[in-house]
Amino acid sequence: MAETRKIRKAVLPVAGLGTRFLPATKAVPKEMLTVVDKPVVQYVVEEALAAGIEHVIFVTGRNKGVIEDHFDIAYELNDTLEKRGKTAELTELEAMLPAAGATSFTRQQAPLGLGHAVWCARDIVGDEPFALLLPDMVMRAEKGCMSGMVELYNEVGGNIIAVEECDPELAHRYGIVGQGEELPGGFRITEMVEKPAKGTAPSNYFINGRYILQPEIFDILSHGERGAGNEIQVTDAMLHLARKQDFSAYKFTGSTYDCGSKDGFIMANVAFALAHPELGPQVGDQMRALLSEKSV
C-alpha cells in the first residue's frame, strides 16, 4: 500500500439557503442556529479539530459572513468581558478560536449541488486527501466520528465513509453501502446505492455525512456532470472514484442529529441540553412535567 498521507484539511459546505427553517434563516445562516449555547457549525468544527484537522475550509455563499466573524476575534466583546470580570466567558471564546491562518473561506456563487461545493475548495485543498463534514449533521459520542475515521484511515488508507445502522425497512430513504471484508471498526465497501428501492438495499448501513476523500475526486467533479436534482453530486463522483480506489466504511455508534430538519434540530437541542452539566437536571425535570401534562 502506498504511503498514507495525513489528513490535515477539512471542507465544510455552508452555502445552503436553509429554506426549511424560514423565516428564522432569512437573516441568520442555518449553520448559526444554536444547539443549546453553540451554533451548529461550531460543533462540527470542534469535531474536526479534535480529529487532528489543522485547516478548516468553509465553502460559503451570500449572507454567510457571520460565520467568518464567529471564528474571528471580537475585540469589542472581549474588551467588555474583560472589564466586567467575565473571565470564564472570555476564556471560552478564546478557546474556540482556530489558530491564525487555520481557516479559509471560498465562495460557491451558484447552488449547483454538494459536489460543486466540494469542487470549489480544490485549490485550497490541493493535491492531498481531505475530510468532508456536512455541517447539518451534529454528532454525540465518546469518540468523535471524524476521530474514529482518521484512525481507520491511518490503518487502511484510501477513502473512508462514516456509516450507521438504520431499520432495514427504512433503508430506501438513505444512501446505502454494501458490506464487505471486516476491518478494525469498519468494513470494506462493495457498492454504494442512493435510496435503493424497497427490499433491494445491500445492507442497512447508511451514509451519515462524514467522509475522507482522496484528491482525485476533484478531477471527476471538474467534469460538472449533473445527477439527481440536476445538481453535481458528490455521491456520483465517489462511484466513479470507487472504480479505481478502495472505499471503506467506519461504523459510527454514537447519536447523529440532522439539524437541517426541524425535528432533528429540536432533538439535538433536547439531547445536548440533557447532557449539559448545569442545565441537564432542570431540563429533565421540566420535560417530565410537560410529558406528564400531555398524558393527562
Image (cartoon, rainbow, N blue to C red):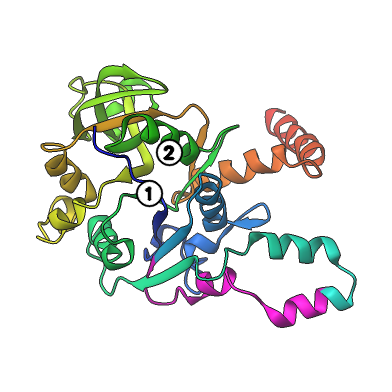
Above or below, comparing residue 79 to residue 264 in the picture: below
Asked if residue 12 lies left or right of residue 227, the reply is right
The residue closer to the viewer here, 197 or 67, is: 67
Q: Position of residue 136 (x, y in %)?
A: 45, 51
How many numbered discs, if any? Answer: 2
Residue 23 is labelled as none
- The residue drawn where x is 28% and y is 62% is 126
For the N terminus, the quadrant is top left
Which residue lies under the disc numbered 1?
Answer: 131
Q: Earlier in the sequence, mark 2 or mark 1?
A: 1
Q: Position of residue 231 (x, y in %)?
A: 18, 58
- The residue drawn where x is 52% and y is 30% is 254
- The residue drawn where x is 69% and y is 60% is 95
* Outermost residue to the right: 85
Q: Position of residue 184 (x, y in %)?
A: 40, 21
The residue closer to the viewer here, 105 or 62, is: 105
Above or below, comparing residue 234 to residue 181 in the picture: below
Stretch of the chain drawn in magenta: 59-81
Label 1 SS: strand
Which residue lies under the disc numbered 2?
Answer: 150
* Outermost residue to the front: 3
- The residue drawn where x is 74% and y is 77% is 77
